[in-house]
Amino acid sequence: MKSLNGRYDPSNDRLKFTEAADAYIEHRQVGVAQGTVRLEKERLRALKTLLAQIAGVDLKLKDIDIRLVRNYQQKRIAEGVGPRTVNMEGQLMRSILKHHEQWKLDGKYQPLPEPMSEPGRSLSPQEEVRLIDAAKSRSQWAVAYHATILENETGMRGVEVRNLEMKRIDLMAAEIHLQKSKTKGGIRIIPLNADALEPVKQLVIRAQMLGASQPEHYLIPALVKTVIVGLNGAVRVRRYDLAKPTKGWRTAWRKLTQKAD
């Protein structure tokens, strides 16, 4: 499409970033897998929030320059976000601007350097015991532990585990039935060995204790903030929303591994 060629069209430069971003996501919903759209929506939330803090909620496409982009990168890193995540958000910003023919930073924009991944190694029995003991001490850490084991044992991607619904799990057959992420039809069957089945069982028990009773409820529901109005006024509380998937467990996993040394 012409709008994706990266040409500059001054007639679009007064479009608000928030409106441009929503139009981009709407366009993507008809052309890519829903899993990809969900990922981009997650990254877009961070983009909108921080850009509004830096430049205001009425930020226009014409005002996105290299200084603003670098400022965004610095502030995200200061928030404790890794460079890979910041780069993916930067790529999304670039795609939104290109879609509206507003990208003019070729030769100026530079992604942040990402650290080289080191080869992994197996845990020693002592390390594994420490990890399991630490995971038992907090509910969030236990979720991170079980979810990570499930990823490693099955090859499932994090987004697939996050969006896993109860109806996709067959404990009797020791299988997970995933809708194929790149096509509208077909089921991908993931067999569960003993090491993968146990974390799934633990996550199912947890979901049921939280109230999961419908096929569409998520295995790992999101923890959301809500306001309850009572006789003594409004109270802000945190609760699990079984109809929404968790955003992830990266922070919990990092804290868990630190605790387990």
Image (tube, helix red, strand yellow):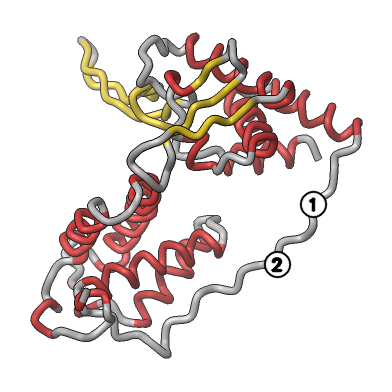
Quadrant hosting residue 68:
bottom left
Q: Residue furthest front?
A: 186
* Label 1 neighbour load within 10 Å: few <14, some 14-19, many 20+: few
Relative height, residue 207 to residue 141 (above, below): above
User: Circle 2 — which element?
Assistant: loop
How would you rate the neighbour count of disc 2 (Cα within 10 Å): few for under 14, some for 14-19, many for 20 or more? few
User: Residue 121, relative to residue 70: is it above or below?
Assistant: above
Q: Relative to residue 100, is residue 171 drawn left or right?
A: right
Residue at the spot of label 2: 116
Residue visible at 14% across and 78% down in the picture: 13
Q: Quadrant of the C terminus?
A: top right
Q: Nearer the viewer, residue 183 or 223?
A: 183
219, above or below 100, in the image: above
> What SS does tag 1 mark?
loop
In percent of width and height, residue 67 lies at 37, 81
Asked which quadrant contains residue 130, the reply is: top right
Who's the residue at 26% across and 74% down the image? 4
Q: Residue visible at 27% across and 60% down?
A: 52
Label number found at residue 120: 1
The amino acid pointed to by label 2 is: Met
Asked whether disc 2 touches disc 1, contact meaning CB atoms under 8 Å apart, the reply is: no
Q: Pick out the residue farthest to the bottom.
A: 107
Left or right, residue 73 beside residue 203: left
Residue sitting at x 85%, y 39% = 123
